[in-house]
Image (cartoon, rainbow, N blue to C red):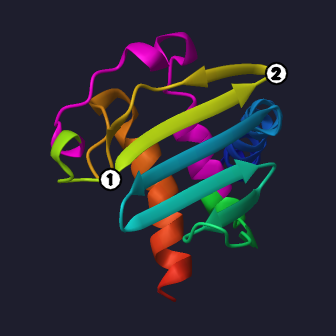
């Protein structure tokens, strides 16, 4: 009986955190762009919906995020200090000589826009790397059929 009570309590507590996290994410719009002469990637995430554009002048392909992807993204989102986003430094500078596409992360939360400085696509600032890599992984999985 104690085991059953502990399991139910644990399940309740785990679910109890989700609504708050879910509400924060519902107030958020995320945009990741990576651009170079030969490459274009635009990923928008809003309210469990993902839209991806891989070519200029192309209509976005729209996907629904799975519950597990949405939860993982929400957990990673919590680690970002929005007010500091623009001060994060890029670890590499290949974008300055066409060695990498120029990438940016923009987050709109409750009507206020927070934007990173540009960084090399594939090498985001350490403070947002897990979050950015998760976002980019959606495009790889969906556009390559994995």
Kindly report the secondary structure that dominates the magenta region of the rendered protein: helix
Task: Give whichever of discs 1 and 2 has the lower sequence position.
Answer: 1
Residue at figure coordinates x 16%, y 37% from the top left: 92
Rendered position, 18 above or below 127: below
- Residue 110 disc label: 2
Q: Is residue 135 magenta?
A: no
Please name the residue that numbered disc 1 is placed on: 101
Rendered position, 119 above or below 33: above
Is 137 left or right of 123, judged from the image as shown? right
Is 38 left or right of 48, judged from the image as shown? left
Separation of marks 1 and 2 at Cα, in angstroms:
29 Å
Look at the image and give the residue range highlighted in magenta. Answer: 70-95
Q: Of 99 and 109, which appears nearest the observer?
A: 99
Q: Of 119 and 95, which appears nearest the observer?
A: 95
Determine the image quadrant of residue 66. Answer: bottom right
- Residue 14 disc label: none
Residue at figure coordinates x 32%, y 53% from the top left: 101
């Amino acid at each position: 009986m104690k085991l059953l009570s502990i399991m139910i309590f644990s399940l309740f507590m785990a679910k109890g955190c989700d609504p708050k996290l879910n509400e924060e994410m519902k107030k958020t719009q995320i945009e990741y762009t990576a651009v170079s002469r030969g490459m274009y990637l635009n990923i928008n995430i809003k309210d469990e919906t993902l839209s991806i554009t891989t070519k200029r002048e192309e209509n976005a392909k729209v996907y629904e995020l799975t519950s597990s992807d949405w939860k993982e993204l929400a957990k990673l989102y919590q680690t970002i200090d929005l007010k500091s986003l623009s001060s994060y430094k890029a670890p590499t500078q290949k974008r300055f000589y066409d060695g990498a596409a120029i990438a940016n992360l923009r987050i709109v939360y409750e009507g206020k826009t927070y934007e990173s400085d540009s960084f090399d696509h594939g090498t985001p600032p350490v403070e947002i790397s897990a979050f950015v890599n998760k976002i980019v992984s959606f495009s790889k999985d969906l556009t390559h059929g994995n």
